[in-house]
Each structure stands twice: as C-alpha cells, then as structure tokens.
Amino acid sequence: MLKLGAISFAGKCPRHPRFDPEDEGAGAIRGGCPRCQALFEIFEAHAHLTALIRNAKNEARPQPRPVAVDHRQTALF
C-alpha cells in the first residue's frame, strides 16, 4: 500500500506574483523567468501524478463479469 500525505504549497514568484500556471500556462512566463518556469513544472508534475492516481484507482476496481447467455433456443424442446 502506498500512502501519500497532503501537501500544501503556496508558491509565488517574487518578480511575477500574479503568474498562475493553471490559468495562464507556459506561454505567460515572461522573459524565461526560472522561478515561474519551476512553478509551471511543479504544476505539470502535480497534474500528471493526480492523473496516475486516478488511473490506478480505476484499474483497481473489479470489472463486472459479463453474464453468460445461452443462445440456444431451449424453449423449443
């Protein structure tokens, strides 16, 4: 079993405090700012990890077995 704790991270770039990687994306990084780039990479890694966790949860659920249907017409006998 893998346990992941809740992590709270409120990161801001001191030069560009209004930069929001979720809303604006990588195209809004001004002048190749390394801190804004790091914030965007953290955001992407978090989104990727969240997607992997969701996929693992969905795969862990048992799939319903299809009901075997007898296609022979036994009512005619």
Image (cartoon, rainbow, N blue to C red):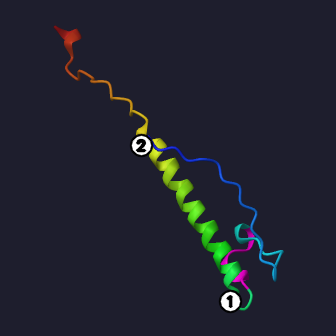
Q: The N terminus is located in which quarter? A: top left
Q: Regarding mark 1 in the picture, which secondary structure is present there?
A: loop
Q: Residues within 10 Å of mark 2 (few under 14, many from 20)?
A: few
Give residue 24's quadrant in the image.
bottom right
Farthest left residue in view: 77
Drawn side of residue 49 relative to residue 66, left or right: right
Is residue 30 covered in magenta? no
Q: Which dot, 1 or 2, sits closer to the camera?
A: 1
Q: Which residue is mark 2?
A: 59
Residue at position x 83%, y 75% from top? 17
- Kindly report the secondary structure that dominates the magenta region of the rendered protein: helix
Q: Is residue 75 shown above or below 4?
A: above
Q: Is residue 73 shown above or below 54?
A: above
Q: What segment is highlighted magenta in the picture?
A: 23-29
Q: Which residue is mark 1?
A: 32
Toward the viewer: 64 or 6? Answer: 6
Drawn side of residue 42 relative to residue 11, left or right: left
Count of numbered labels shown in the rendering: 2
Of pointers 1 and 2, the one earlier in the residue sequence = 1
Q: Amino acid at mark 2?
A: Glu
Residue at position x 23%, y 9% from top? 75
In the rendering, at what x and y percent does residue 3 appear? 52, 44
Residue at position x 47%, y 49% from top? 55
Drawn side of residue 77 relative to residue 27, left or right: left
Q: Regarding mark 2 in the picture, which secondary structure is present there?
A: helix
Toward the viewer: 52 or 5? Answer: 5
Compute the Cα span from label 1 to label 2: 39 Å
